[in-house]
Amino acid sequence: MKEFLGAHPNSHVLYPICSNEPLPVYEPPTPRIGKRRLLYTGTAFGAYGRMLLGLADLLKTNPDWELVIYGAEPDWPPSVIRAARDTGLYRGFLPFEKLKEELRQADACLAVMSFENQLETMMRTSFTTKFLDYCAAGRPVILWGPSYCSPSMLAKREKAALVVETPEAEAVVAQLRRLSDATLFEQLCEGSRGLAKGVLSHGQIHDVFVSNIRALVGKKTLGHDVPS
C-alpha cells in the first residue's frame, strides 16, 4: 500500500498480524513414501483457482511432487471438483488447529498472487496472510506472484522464499526441482522461520503500531498530558 500511494511524512508499514502463540519447535517433515507434498491453503477460486488448476494439471505427470489444497471449495466445474477430491488434490476445509499440523508435515508451501491485469491494483495493495502461517510452520515457501506484489518484495528482500514472478506453471515446477538440494531446503526453512521470528512476528508488528501511535499523539492530547 505504501508503494502504491507514494511517499508521505507519516506512513508506516504494518504487515498482517499473526497469532501471539509461541512458534512451534521446528521439526523436519516426516520422510514421505511417494511424492513430496506442496501444500496450498486459502482462496482457490477466481484467478487463484485457475493458477492452481493449471499447476495441478502439470503435476499429474510429475514423479516427485503433488499439490494438495485445503480451503473453501473452488469454483471449478463440478466434474473437476469431484475428480480433485478423488485424487486428493482438493481436501476440503480444516479447522486451523488441524491445518497447522498439515502445514508442519508439508514438504513445501505455496502462496499465490494473481498476474491478471484487472487485478493489478489489488495485488499491489494486498498481502496474502497465509504466508504468515507458512512461515510459522517453518516450511520452505514458493511465492508465485508478480514482482510488484508485497509478498514477493518481502520474500526477496529477506531471502525467505523461492519467488516465481512469471505466470507459467512450469516455472513453479522448476523451483520445486531445486528443493531436492538439501542445503537449499534447510536455508529456506531457516528463512521462513526468520520471518516468523522477525518482520512478521506478532511482537514486532505490535511494537511498530504502538510506537508510531505514541509518536503521533506525543505527550499531549487536547492540551492534556498523556500518561506514559
Image: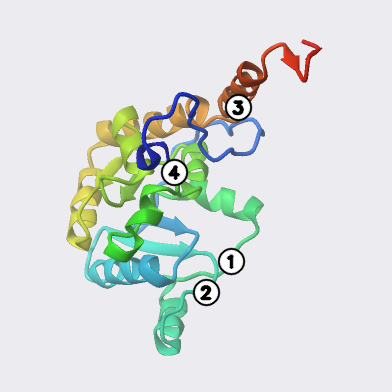
- Which quarter of the picture shows residue 6? top left
Identify whether 113 is placed above or below 20. Answer: below
* Residue at mark 1 to residue at mark 3: CA–CA distance: 32 Å
Spatial CA span between label 3 and label 4:
35 Å
Circle 2 packing at 10 Å, graded few (<14), some (14-19), many (20+), is some
Residue hosting label 4 = 29
Q: Amino acid at mark 2?
A: Glu
- Mark 3 or mark 4, which is nearer to you? 3
Q: Specify the quadrant of the image occupied by residue 186.
A: top left
Instruction: Tell me which numbered mark, 2 or 3, is placed earlier along the sequence.
Output: 2
In percent of width and height, residue 97 lies at: 65, 51
Neighbours of disc 1 within 10 Å: few (<14), some (14-19), many (20+): some
- SS class, disc 1: loop
Q: Which residue is mark 2?
A: 73
Instruction: Tell which of 204 and 179 is nearer to you.
Output: 204
**Residue at x-position 45% and y-position 64%:** 69
The residue carrying mark 1 is 93
Q: Given contact means CB atoms under 8 Å apart, are the residues at marks 1 and 2 in contact?
A: yes
Which badge, 1 or 2, comes first in the chain's sequence? 2
For numbered disc 4, what is the local secondary structure? loop
Q: CA distance from mark 4 to mark 1?
A: 22 Å
Look at the numbered discs 3 and 4 and tell me whether their residues touch, using CB distance below 8 Å: no
